[in-house]
Image (tube, grey):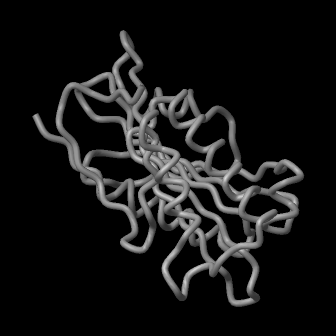
Amino acid sequence: MATGPPFGFGIQGPDDWARLETAPNRWQRSVERLLDPPPGGTGRLPAAARRDAAGVLEDLVAVAQHTGVVLCLVKLARDAGGRLFYGSLTLGWYDSAPVPADLAFARLVVGRADDVEELDTPTGPGLLHRTTEAVPPEWRDLFGGADAHAAQALVPVPGTRWTALVSGTTSNSCHADLLAGLVRRMAGSLRVGA
């Protein structure tokens, strides 16, 4: 079940990414819609690739449901070489009660990571953390490559115990910098209200 802070908020993702519904009664239809793209997108996937892509999206839904993600965006496309490209962007919230949300707490969450940069956002200062992780075999067959590239922005909301978590994953190392830029831009678009 999606959870979030007691205050209003807004955020903007890339216009050409599709929303993946994660609610129990809507996610299956959403996955089917993403796998039947309009002409000029990924094209009709072969049956095996379609099953594997559905599995990747279903895994994303399961993680989103388990972690309380409130927004999930997905991009399925073909790159210039014709290979299938996958990217995801999510927004979740972390409640650090009784500890106040601040940059010091965000640094504790990130730990002693090497690839961390500070962000200036309208909400306040945040951190961007980048990682590379091995992927399951079905990702290798579907997208190529042995690694997934991830970026996560942690944006503490001053005066509260809530930290926004804007996360992204891509299947292609060529898109890792683009993904980090999208996470940075999405985190920068976060607006919170009373």
Expressed as whole percent of the image width and height from the top left, the position of residue 158 reads 26, 33
Residue at x 29%, y 35% (from the top left corner)? 157
Residue at x 66%, y 42% (from the top left corner)? 59
Residue at x 32%, y 29% (from the top left corner)? 4
Q: Is residue 168 left or right of residue 86?
A: left
Expressed as whole percent of the image width and height from the top left, the position of residue 164 reads 38, 39
Hey, which residue is sitting farthest top in the picture? 98
Which quadrant is home to the C terminus? top left
Hey, which residue is sitting farthest left in the picture? 194
Residue at x 89%, y 52% (from the top left corner)? 137
Q: Is residue 141 left or right of residue 85?
A: right
Expressed as whole percent of the image width and height from the top left, the position of residue 155 reads 39, 42
Judging depth in this view, the residue of 180 and 140 nearest the camera is 140
Expressed as whole percent of the image width and height from the top left, the position of residue 172 reads 73, 69
92 above or below 179?
above
16 above or below 99?
below
Q: Is residue 106 left or right of residue 83?
A: left
